Image: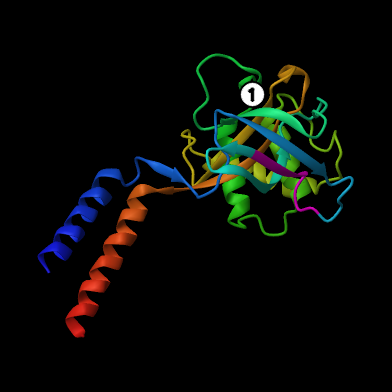
Amino acid sequence: MKKEMLLVSLLLIITHSFSGQITCALADTPPVGEEVTISWVSFYSKPNLDSYYEITVTWTDSEGTHSQTYPGWCADSGVYVASSPYQAILIPSNDLPDEEQVYSDDEQWCKINYLMNQWSAKAYSGASWVDIQQVIWYYADTGYVINSVPPKVADTTTVWSIIADVEANAPEECDYPEYAIISVPKENPANHQLIFFMIPEIPLGTIGAFLSMFSAYMIKRRKLT
């Protein structure tokens, strides 16, 4: 019993220490800051997509080769995308380096992150991915005019209502449950379109809280048996 209580106490300390401060990526997620292979297909060749791109990220580590597929989005309306597949470095949009880079020249990533989290939570009833892509370009390309670039014609009323929500509610900090992971092509990054996708993260405090509750349950269960 003493050992079990000690375990619960330690887990509570971990929860208190880390809650809201440190996060860990979900299992088998691409490594940021390292080289990966990006393969993509767009809605032009796969019309049933619910995003501009479907991208597959492939990387190799000490455990072998891994591959994950994500809905992908375009952050540069007037630049050509690198041919698929291409080598890229993954950069987290909520932790960009201070120096000016091709991936942070005019993109408003905090607002884009807010937008994508709202979209993931199905907050924009009636909106389509086409509407969302137009809003992304509005915040990714300075001076972008809604519906000036395909893929398809978005609903202008819906687009502007989403922009109004972002303007009113997007916080200044970029820390969200999900944030954009930008794939920066290794070759000629300034001449290629930026594709990004979202990776959810779990606060370590949340994990600690779950383990604490689980341990307490097991102790109670043992008492009853």
The quarter in which the C terminus is drawn is bottom left
Q: How many labels does the image show?
A: 1
Say whether residue 20 is visible. yes
Q: Is residue 55 above or below residue 92?
A: below
Name the chief secondary structure element in magenta: strand
Depth check: give the residue in front, 121 or 169. Answer: 121
* Colour setup of the view: rainbow
- Label 1 Cα crowd, 10 Å radius (few <14 / some 14-19 / many 20+): many
Seen as rendered, the residue at the extreme bottom is: 225
Residue 56 coordinates in the image, percent (x, y): 71, 44
Query: Helix, strand, or loop for circle 1?
Result: helix
Q: Is residue 117 above or below residue 189?
A: below
Which residue lies at the image location 63% right of the left edge and 32% below the top edge?
182
Extent of the magenta region: 49-58
Residue 142 coordinates in the image, percent (x, y): 70, 24
The quarter in which the N terminus is drawn is bottom left
Q: Is residue 50 magenta?
A: yes
Say whether residue 165 is visible. no
Residue 141 coordinates in the image, percent (x, y): 72, 27
Provide the residue designation for mark 1.
103
Q: Is residue 225 magenta?
A: no
- Where on the picture, by quarter, is residue 208? bottom left
